[in-house]
Image (cartoon, rainbow, N blue to C red):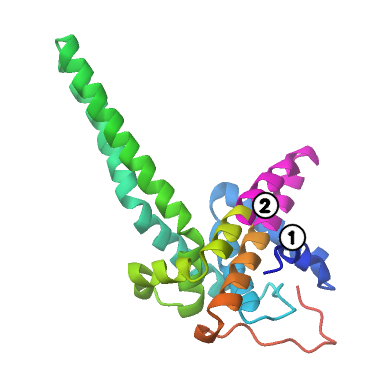
Amino acid sequence: MDFGKSFTFMFDDKDWVGKILIGALFALLSIALVGIPFLVGYTLEVVRRAAAGREDALPAWDDLGDKFVQGLVLLVIFFVFMLPATLLSGCLGASLSTISENIRSDAGATMFGLGAALVGLLASAYAFVVGLFYPAITMRYAMTRDFGATFNLAELWRVATANLGSYIIVLLVTWVAGLIAGFGVIACVIGVFVTYFWGMLVSAHITGQYWHENLTSEVVAPSEPDLPSETTTF
């Protein structure tokens, strides 16, 4: 995989300025949660294009309804995967506020504290594991567009372990892109929305590259068709 390409591919598009500015606008709207599904849906198309080995990996900002729906579906998928950790944390919080008022001994407080720490540790560990499978979950949905198929744990494991070394690179590149994206706040705050979107593009492209290199024969969800070369569409 050419992980360096993932950091710069967007600048190869002749209309990259307009497309990235539109992405930054949706990132701004994400403050009110409105823009998030659009951004996620857009990056799913980047994953598909990179998975297909296409050079024009930066899609146009069209079919917004479709992008919104696809992005919303993937967000729901992640919500479902994270639900056990959320429920554990919620139960822990409720228990802390209720039981702590009724503990009368130091021994009871110690036992309760240990139990609460264990539950918190389990919730954190589960969330961490789900985070490790974030690229696999994204690939599975991007390439199948099938809500149910994304919960096939055996398939997620197979996708993640098709090339474990490359998968770790995907995770590292995503992490580095996120760190770099945070520096956008230096550019008069508004820059953070540009770099936030850029970081999402980097993650999507390296994820698609992984599929192209290791699972390319399984691409089943077609990416958007090429636009005529003389047409400029943001």
Question: Toward the viewer: 119 or 223?
Answer: 119
* Residue farthest to the top, as pictured: 105
Q: Does residue 152 appear in this view?
A: no
In the displayed structure image, the side of residue 61 where residue 64 appears, left or right: left
Q: Which mark is residue 177?
A: 2
The residue at 52%/69% (across/down) is 163
Q: Is residue 131 left or right of residue 29?
A: left
Q: Indicate which disc residue 7 carries.
A: 1
- What amino acid is labelled 1 in the image? Phe
Residue drawn at (78%, 63%) of the image:
8
Name the spot of residue 52 as percent of width and height, x first.
63, 82
Q: Give the amino acid at mark 2.
A: Ala
The image quarter containing residue 54 is bottom right
- On the image, the x and y values in percent for residue 75 come to 46, 60
Few, some or many residues within 10 Å of mark 2 (<14, 14–19, 20+): many
Instruction: In the rendered view, tell whether residue 215 sits above or below residue 116.
Output: below
**Image quadrant in which you'd find residue 118:** top left
**Which SS type dominates the magenta stretch?**
helix
Magenta range = 173-199
Residue 135: give its label.
none
The vertical placement of 107 against 196, above or below, is above
Which sits earlier in the primary sequence, circle 2 or circle 1?
1
Residue drawn at the location 76% of the way across and 46% of the way down? 191
Classify 10 Å Cα crowding around label 1: few (below 14), some (14-19), many (20 and above): some
The stretch drawn in magenta includes residue 130: no
Residue 223 shown left or right of residue 192 in the figure: left
- Determine contact: label 2, label 1, CB under 8 Å: yes
Q: Which secondary structure, mark 1?
A: helix
Q: Quadrant of the C terminus?
A: bottom right
Is residue 117 visible in this depiction of the protein? yes
Circle 2: element type: helix
